[in-house]
Each structure stands twice: as C-alpha cells, then as structure tokens.
Amino acid sequence: MRDDRPAGTGVLIVTLFLAALLEVIPLPDAVNWVRPEWMLLVLVYWVLTLPRRVGVLWGFFVGLYMDVLTGTTLGQWGLGFSLGAFIMLLAYKRMRVFTVLQQCAVIFLLVGSVSLLAYLVQEAGGRTLYPPYTILYSSLASAIVWRPVCALLRWVQLRFIVR
Amino acid sequence: MSAPANPLYRLVAALILSIIVMVLDQRTPWAAPVRYFLGALTAPVHYIAHLPVDSGQWLTEQAQSRSSLLEENQRLQRKSLILEQKVQRLAVLEAENVRLRELLNSSADLDANVLVAEIIGLDADPNRQELVINKGAGSQVIKGQAVLDAQGLIGQVVEAGPLSSRVLLVTDASHAMSVQVNRNGVRAVLAGTGQAGGLRLLYVPDTADIEEGDLLVSTGLGQRYPRGYPVATITSVRHQSGAAFAEITARPTARIDRASHVLLVQRSPQPARQAEEVTDEG
C-alpha cells in the first residue's frame, strides 16, 4: 500500500531557508545582476512535485518572507510568488512531460514575469533605478540553474522522504 | 495526485491580501508589526550568510605572527595617544562652545552616545543602496537613527527588526539630506544617485562658492541627522551656460564599501510631535 500522508514539511522549509541564504549571500556588484531567484526556484520545484500540498498560499507566505528579507515593500514578492505558484499549479502536468529545454524556457518566462511584477510594484513606489530589461539577466541565470536545482531537490526529496 | 479543488479562489485571496499589505506598508505604519515578526526569522539568515566572512577574519587573526601583532599594538597605541591629545583639547573647546551658545541664547548641542554594530549584509538588489547590521530593537536601535563609520556619515536606520536592522545609505537614489560646506557654511541638499560612492548636490546656484575638495558636513536641519558630522567631499563642479543650477558631484567620506563596523548615534528621545514631522524625510 502506498503511504500518502504528508511528511517532511520541516525539510521543505529548510530548503527554502537555504534558498534564502543564497538570496542574500554577499556578491560582487557585477555578479549581483545574474543572481538567480533561488527562493522562487525552490518554491516552483515543490509546487511541481507536491501540487496537493504546496500552492498559492505557500507562495504568498514565502514571498512575504522574501519581502522582509530583502527590505522591499511588503507584498511585492508576495504578489508575484502567489501568481507564480498558481501558474505552476495549472501547468504542473505539462511540465512533467516537457523536455529539459522546454522546462528551462518555462522557468525563464515565469521568473521573468514574476520579477517584472515586482519591478512594477517597485516602480510605483519610486524605488527603481535601472531599466526593466535588467530582469533578463537574473531570469536567464534562473533558467540555467533550474536543472541542477531540480536534481538536488529531487535527491533531498527522496533522501528525507518529503511528500 | 491532483491539484487542490480550486486554486483560483486562493489566488484571488492572495492577490487581494498582497495589495492590502502593500498599501498598508506604503501609506500607514500598521504593517510594521508584520515586518518586525518576520524580521526575527530573517535575521538568522543574514547572520549565517555572514559566517564565511567572520570565520575568515577569525582565521587571519589566529594566523597573525607575534611580531606583526606587536607592531600593530604599537601603532594603535601611538594613534590612541594622538587621539587622546586631540580629545583633551576637544573638552575645552566643547565647554567654550556651550558658553558661547549660552551667550547667544541658543540651545547647546548634546553629546551623543554611540553604539557599535557590525555590517552583516548588503542589499542584493542593485536598485537599492542598503545594508543590514547586527543590532536591532533589542539593542535600543530605533528607526531614523544616524549611522556613521570612523570617517563620516553612512546613512540612517529605516527598519529596526528584533535582531538586525536595515540601513539606508546616503548614496541611495531615494535619499536626500541637508548639508553645508565646512569652509563657508553654504547650505545645500545632498542627494544619492543610486551608484555606490555617487552623490550630487541639488539646486545649487551657479554663483555659489563651492569648490572641488570642499568638505560637506551635516547641518542637523530636518532633525534626523546630528549636526556637524562629515558626509562627503566635492569631486567635481561644472558650470553649464544656460543651466539654472551648477552640476556638482560628491563622494562620501565614509568608506561604505570597506567598512565592517559602524557606529549608531543614540539620541535623547525627541518629543512625539517632532518625530511625526520628520517621518517623511529621507
């Protein structure tokens, strides 16, 4: 009999904390532009693998945490992350049959649109300095690291039995 | 496995909640408790992210030879002697200043207490010039406090969490403060450009007596920063025919990119009315 009870919430949260760590680790200015959106990637992975458990509300609270972590307007990333989680909930079945390249393209578009949403909120608050196309760098970096992140989280999921 | 019955409702709820939180955060102080609570959860992340730097420093300290330590000790002792001598004169000057101010019937400048904090994080977002320090409301850090290093003003506390605080640098594009030229007392508004190390003076008439190399000090107007701390030095002055104002750029005297420790200036609590007035400044 297959055991379907939820397990490993702690592990899930730990992976999110590790992503938060990567999000704030000090980097030289030039590399800062290509910092992938680690938190969003980890969230997306868990939405794709556990769509029953991790969804829009997780997205909202992880986003809110990201807001406090990076000192942005509360709700700026909360908005984007909940929308990102929602889109992934609609697409998770398709994502499973996509090729690697297609998956990366989806991640690129997803991170790009979530970041753009956050950029617009920042713009409304008058806190932007650089033109919006700078989002492309971090979106591209996110798409590139997506597969390794996936493999790592897959290992974590099997090793610590998260379901 | 199938997705939850209808994630659309949850999405709508999350979107509405986000927008409410955004408006509350931008327009009212009511979102502050949420920030404060979550701040307790984000501070450990900043602390851990800073660990490699800390352990690197610890290793260098441990690996230093006895002779270099002795040398450093001697150098610091000499420096301390010189500083002590300067402080001796300062006490006299301060007393004299207070007497003169009394003669002029103006209020005396109070001596400020200082709290030392360590920088544990820099902002990952290139659109912002902010940093995170390892002292929070638990160490009596309050929003609006001035932050300096040994060379000059760095910025102000914009968010005091329980264990860490966020400092807005003077170089942030949304930051502006009142300064005056130390040489002749000409006042101007010093604004950040968003680039590290980039500042500019706003609305200075073409004829104002400001030269390259002039030191700009805080005026204390606006009541957020204490008076008389060095802020920046002028790097270039350009007069353009036809333009209404001179184009003046400056560089912070504080070594923002190299400092590892900062000083927080503690002030005596101000009346609530005054605090109310200055919340929109900066």
Image (cartoon, grey):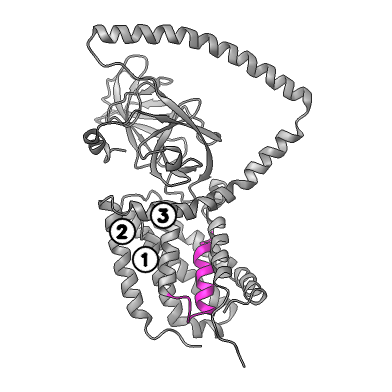
Q: Which secondary structure dominates the residues rendered in magenta?
A: helix
Image quadrant holding the C terminus of chain B, namely top left
Q: Residues within 10 Å of mark 2 (few under 14, many from 20)?
A: many
Q: Is residue A87 above or below residue A80?
A: below
User: How far apart are labels 2 and 1 at the CA level?
Assistant: 9 Å
How far across and how far down the image is residue A14, in percent? 57, 64
User: How far apart are labels 1 and 3 at the CA level?
Assistant: 19 Å
Q: Identify which amino acid the numbered label 3 is placed on.
A: Phe
The residue under label 3 is B37
Q: Is residue A7 left or right of residue B73?
A: left
How far across and how far down the image is residue A109, in percent? 46, 71
The residue under label 2 is B22
Query: Which numbered disc, 3 or 2, marks the residue closer to the eye?
Result: 3
- Judge whether residue A17 is colored magenta: no
Which residues make up the magenta segment? A36-55
Tag shown at residue A79: 1
Q: Identify which amino acid the numbered label 2 is placed on.
A: Met
Q: Residue at x 28, y 20 (%)?
A: B208
Q: Residue at x 38, y 37 (%)?
A: B192
